[in-house]
């Protein structure tokens, strides 16, 4: 295996006396400048070289100093290498500089065994922007370094003093800059602290406002709950009080119209019919108010059981067919697909669907009202679709408000309580009541219930 060629040295020196330390330092700076190291790196290398030279002179009687321009195999960059071959073997084959700062002045400092020779080696990388060192240029540098006369110790001392003064000036300049930066930093810190204190005060003020708002909301919520409970009690009490006289009026009107009673004139029979019809409407309103009060107060508890939708649909088909009095309106109740069972309460579910079908028949002048069921995974979708006038999108939520009725030419009698009550019942059964409607396209109310119940 062929060993790589050993670079020819740029300069060789002998270190044997104190005077040589100054020469090694001086020549080291000259070589560093010749290969293109920056001024600060020249000073660092010369300082490290003089410290190592002094250590070796005192411990092993000096060394042979060789300056070589080598190449870093990893980066490919030029490296100025200085090898100091001790005049006597190093103690324990090791070298530790007296000052720990020396190693920080160069890129590498340590003991290296090169073949049979052991040397103390230091190196410094040449900047990439330095002038390319061609073989011709290196030969010229060797000639120039060999022919140049070294300065005296006094000259080197003067150069060191100049470098020290320059370094002190730089340190002073950096210190002044640092003081300015510290002053700016302190001012910035004061500004940050002032802003932090301001933000803290604002945050505390906001927190106090939020706490006060929550307290006010809690108070309003308690008042709303109390008002809702009072309203429910009022509706329940009024409904109970009104049911008895209204039922009595209906009963008396039936007695007056009974064939066993004294015969009435045609006008009297018409008036009695109006009284009974009005009383029946009033009784329906009272019953709706009572149901709504029960639902709001939470006194309705579903009696959960398996409900057969086919039987329920058949019951609705029979009881509501009589309400489809308009010849132009057809009531269609489709047969639910098997297995048509859902866990719910039959009475409450029937009340919801009856209410939706009744509304569809009231608000549809021609076409049909259709009830159908569809199984979607774990959900049942029970929809009531009519071909009425439809409801504008902005009123889709308002129709579920109590006592609200959609204005229009097709408005018929009612209290505006049926849909709010139906939604509460569906929620109680663990489902949702949804609406899809457009003006002129009819409406579809869909009850969505879980198959297994809430």
Image (cartoon, helix red, strand yellow):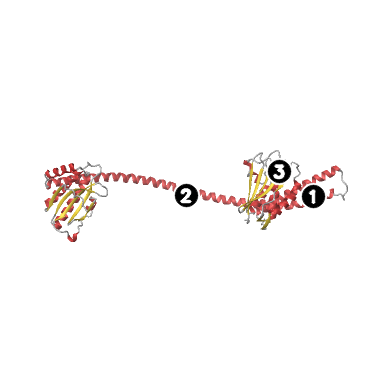
Instruction: List x then y, in percent, for residue 147.
Output: 11, 43
Residue 396: which numbered mark, if any?
none
In the rendered view, tell whether residue 438 sits above or below residue 2. Answer: above
Local secondary structure at mark 3: strand
Outermost right residue: 262
**Which residue carries the number 3 mark?**
368
Residue at x 32% of width, y 45% of height = 183
**Which residue carries the number 2 mark?**
204
Sooner in the amino-acid sequence: mark 2 or mark 1: 2
- Disc 2 to disc 1: CB gap under 8 Å: no
Looking at the image, which is closer to me, 3 or 366?
3
Residue at x 54% of width, y 50% of height = 214
Report the side of 249 relative to 175 (left or right).
right
Local secondary structure at mark 2: helix
For marks 3 and 2, give the one nearer the viewer. 3
**Residue 347 can be seen in this image:** yes
**Residue 234 can be seen in this image:** no
Looking at the image, which is closer to me, 384 or 104?
384
For marks 2 and 1, give the one nearer the viewer. 1
Report how far apart the C-alphas of labels 1 and 3 lie in the structure.
33 Å
Report the side of 387 relative to 210 (left or right).
right
Task: Categorize mark 2 by other alpha carbons within 10 Å: few (<14), some (14-19), many (20+).
Answer: few
Residue 250: which numbered mark, if any?
1
Task: Categorize mark 3 by other alpha carbons within 10 Å: few (<14), some (14-19), many (20+).
Answer: many
For residue 397, which quarter of the picture?
top right
């Amino acid at each position: 295996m062929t060993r790589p060629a050993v670079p020819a040295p740029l300069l060789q020196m002998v270190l044997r006396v104190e005077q040589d330390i100054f020469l090694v330092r001086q020549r080291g700076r000259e070589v560093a400048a010749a290969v293109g190291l920056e001024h600060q790196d020249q000073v660092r290398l010369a300082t490290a070289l003089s410290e190592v030279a002094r250590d070796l002179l005192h411990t092993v009687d000096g060394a042979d100093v060789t300056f070589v321009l080598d190449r870093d195999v990893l980066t490919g960059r030029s490296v100025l290498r200085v090898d100091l071959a001790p005049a006597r073997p190093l103690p324990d084959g090791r070298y530790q500089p007296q000052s720990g700062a020396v190693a920080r002045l160069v890129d590498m400092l340590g003991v290296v065994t090169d073949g049979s020779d052991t040397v103390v080696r230091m190196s410094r990388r040449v900047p990439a922007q330095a002038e390319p060192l061609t073989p011709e240029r290196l030969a010229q540098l060797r000639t120039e370094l060999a022919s140049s006369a070294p300065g005296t110790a006094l000259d080197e001392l003067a150069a060191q003093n100049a470098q020290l003064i320059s370094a002190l000036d730089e340190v002073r300049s950096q210190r002044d800059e640092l003081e300015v930066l510290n002053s700016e930093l302190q001012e910035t810190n004061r500004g940050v602290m002032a802003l932090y204190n301001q933000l803290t005060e604002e945050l505390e003020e906001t927190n106090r406002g939020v706490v006060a708002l929550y307290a006010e909301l809690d108070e309003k919520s308690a008042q709303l709950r109390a008002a809702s409970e009072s309203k429910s009690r009022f509706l329940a009490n009024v409904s109970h009080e009104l049911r008895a006289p209204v039922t009595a009026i209906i009963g008396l009107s039936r007695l007056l119209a009974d064939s066993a009673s004294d015969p009435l004139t045609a006008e009297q029979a018409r008036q009695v019919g109006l009284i009974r019809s009005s009383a029946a409407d009033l009784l329906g309103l009272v019953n709706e108010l009572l149901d709504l009060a029960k639902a709001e107060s939470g006194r309705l508890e579903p009696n959960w059981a398996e409900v057969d939708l086919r039987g329920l649909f058949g019951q609705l088909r029979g009881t509501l067919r009589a309400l489809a009095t308009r010849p132009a309106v057809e009531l269609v109740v489709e047969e639910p697909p098997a297995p048509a069972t859902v866990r719910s309460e039959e009475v409450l579910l029937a009340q919801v669907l009856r209410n939706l079908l009744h509304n569809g028949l009231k608000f549809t002048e021609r076409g049909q009202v259709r009830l159908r069921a569809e199984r979607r995974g774990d959900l049942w979708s029970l929809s009531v679709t009519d071909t009425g006038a439809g409801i504008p999108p902005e009123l889709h939520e308002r129709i579920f408000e109590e006592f609200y009725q959609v204005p229009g030419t097709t408005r018929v009698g009612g209290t505006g309580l049926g849909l709010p009550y139906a939604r509460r019942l569906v929620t109680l059964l663990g489902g949702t009541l949804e609406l899809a409607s457009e003006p002129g396209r009819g409406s579809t109310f869909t009850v969505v219930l879980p198959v297994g119940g809430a």
